[in-house]
Image (cartoon, helix red, strand yellow):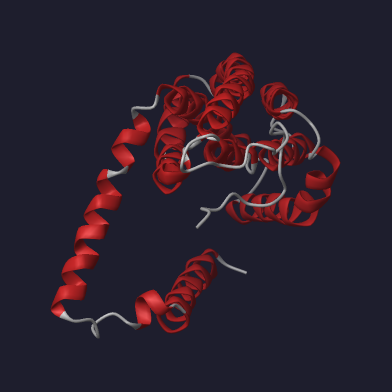
Amino acid sequence: MSLRSVFLAGGAMLVLGGIVMLFALNETIGVGHATGDDRHDGEDEEEEGLSALLPAFRDGRLAKLLLWVVLFEVAGNWIEAVIPLYAHDAGTLTPSGVGALFAYAAALTVGLQMLVSRMVEARSALWLTVGAGLATILAFALLAASPAILTLIGAVSLCSIAQMLVGPLVPTAVNALAPPARRASYMGASSVAVDLKDSLGPSIGTALYALAPRLPWIAGIPLVAIASLGLGATIGRARRPSCESGSDRSSGPEAVDTTEPPMAWSPKPATEQP
């Protein structure tokens, strides 16, 4: 319709989401009704929760996992960050056309995510990350070859498939890696690492594009290949020690269930267990 309508619709959704959160969640609707002691206890718990993220980053296994996640996400984000510039400079798409292109990519993810989940849920982590890496590499190769409209559609389609494979795998892996008592802090650390793509991805991608229009795609191919292999191998190695340590703890006073099968991919989101 128009570029103005994009911001108007986005702002309306943010306002609507804030209203729903205010009236539908007990945590927000009860604000202002707590006693002084309750508020003090809540502040202490919040401070402990924020400080609890730091030890999660000091876990060597988690640090290696998140390093590969950041590399993969940052490189993959170049498709979203650089395509608008790439298509505009080549005269392939207007700004509205770029918006329609990424709307198509989002619709593709919504429509196929559960189907892809069922098809690959029994696959290993290495298979999933390598598959996502190959899809992203092929997207980069297409973009390096030509900025034509069919090439752009194919690239964003492959990028969406890669995110369908890897996106749910990362929280599932972190959830399996985390000790039961520290699961929330590990998931928080994972969220912080993934969010880095929104800052590092566009800045690095546009800087490479400023040097040469095809440089982000050429540089992204080896980076994604290394990151996908490292991510799959790290998840596999991290899973085995966690299973062994879980079996060692099973005889203690806080025994945990270690009868679960080796982790593949789960279509269900990883959540903190009570």
The N terminus sits in image quarter: bottom right
Depicted 212 relative to depicted 55: above or below: above
Q: Residue at x 72, y 34 (%)?
A: 264
Residue 96 x, y percent position in the rendering: 62, 56
Residue nearest the viewer, comparing 38 with 269? 38
Front in this rendered view, residue 32 or 133 = 32
Q: How many labels, in total?
A: 0
How far across and down, in percent of the image, does residue 244 sit?
58, 24
Identify which residue is drawn at 65% across, 50% down: 102
The residue at 83%/50% (across/down) is 115
Q: Nearer the viewer, residue 50 or 247?
A: 247
Please provide percent x and percent y for residue 257: 61, 42
- Residue under the image location 83 percent in, 46 percent down: 118
Q: Is residue 253 above or below residue 110?
A: above
Nearer to us in this view, 159 or 206: 159
Q: Which quarter of the figure has residue 82?
A: top right
